[in-house]
Amino acid sequence: MYIDPHVHMVSRTTDDYQRMALAGCVAITEPAFWAGYDRSSPQGFHDYFSVLTDTEPKRAAQYGIAHHTWLCINPKEAEDPVFAREVLEIIPEFLKCESVLGIGEIGLNKNSRNELEILEAHLQLAADHDQMVLVHTPHLEDKRKGTRLIMDAIKNHGVLDPNRVLIDHVEEHTVRDVLDRGYWAGMTLYPDTKCTPQRAADIFEMHGTDRLWINSAGDWGPSDPLAVPKCRDEMRRRGHLEATIRKVSFDNPLEFLSQTGRFRIDVQPTR
Amino acid sequence: MSTSPPPLPLYRHAVVDRYFLEHRAKVLDLAAFLDRVDRAKPDAADSNRDFRLDSLRGAIALLLDGEPERAKRVLDLMSDPSTEPIAAAPMKGATGAWDGFKPASARDGETG
Ligand SMILES: [Zn+2]
């Protein structure tokens, strides 16, 4: 039994839900993200949020997977602050939905001033509505700088409790800093650009298993919706205890996400 | 409550037995890639001085310095070291290496 706490099912087929269920997935959370193209209007985001809060939970429930979501305008579409603020205005109406866990995945992409301005607007939205936060950190050469800028922005904002914020896509050069500042951290298992299952297992061995989880971030690019069970398998092959494997792929996401009061793992297959 | 990291349960020989062939193949991929760059038609600019290649060569040198935390240090080497936000995002993607990276040989030649 496992939880994939970061996966973009709008970009995946129903077959993937079935394969994840067969591999033991009981619950997922799907943050709002850049779908591979820029949406031309706030209405485009309204439609996307409807898919995240209505269509995907039904699709997941067919296979007994509890679907939850996080809402935002992602940093890749936040370079136009006027447009981004229009999208921010439609988020509160969706926060009433039972499967919405908070604001996410917010953060930075190229570490620009406009991205930072919209990140700060999201932090305020989260504070105003007492929401938890899921943070996206930049890719590749921009990650270390962006991770630090994001943590500084959250600290300077001053309202959000780090224990209610998860900073995602950490790697060897950012994980220690994130955990030391009191945040939760996520490792994304990607074939090329983030962590492999082997490196994620290494990081658990070097930095511990507290406040740290793994996710597939499966989406429309090179990614693997079965990456979490593959990492579980890697840890099992190394001889790690079942309790350790369960902690990083089930207990930790359950503990963090249960703070929302909305997270569930008990969906019966509807098909 | 904080728990200590779960130690790697394998002996050293088991790690080598299990992962050697996979990483032998990765070294060969890397060698063949550098050969391929050399064999490719030259550009107007000297493509052998590409910042990504310079970073890769820097990373390879770092693997052999005998110090720990190689993965972290490779990522640090390929990271943008600046600390201030930039004026505007020039693109959505990332290249994988910091475009200001200079190899040690070029840095040695700097005077200021
Ligand atoms: Zn994502």
Image (cartoon, rainbow, N blue to C red):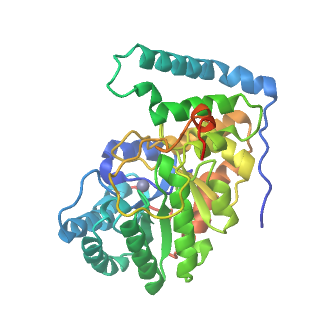
Compared with A99, A9 (above or below) is above
Q: Nearer the viewer, residue A27 or B94?
A: B94
Figure quadrant, ligand 1 = bottom left
A218 sits left or right of A147 in the view: left
Horizontal arrangement in the rendering, residue A191 relative to residue A73 (left or right) = right
Tell me, yes or no, if residue A169 can be seen here.
no
| Residue at (63% x, 18% y) in the render | B21
Residue at point 72%, 52% (across, down): A207
> Measured from the top left, where is residue A163 in percent x and y?
62, 72
Give residue A121's position: percent from left, percent from top: 40, 78
Please state the horizontal and vertical placement of residue A222, each as a whole percent of the image: 39, 39
Q: Is residue A31 above or below residue B9?
A: below
The residue at 52%/76% (across/down) is A261
Q: Is residue B79 above or below residue B49?
A: below
The reply, left or right, for residue B36 in relation to residue B11 is left
Residue B91 appears in the picture as rendered: yes
Quadrant in which the N terminus of chain B appears: bottom right
Expressed as whole percent of the image width and height from the top left, the position of residue A134 reads 49, 66
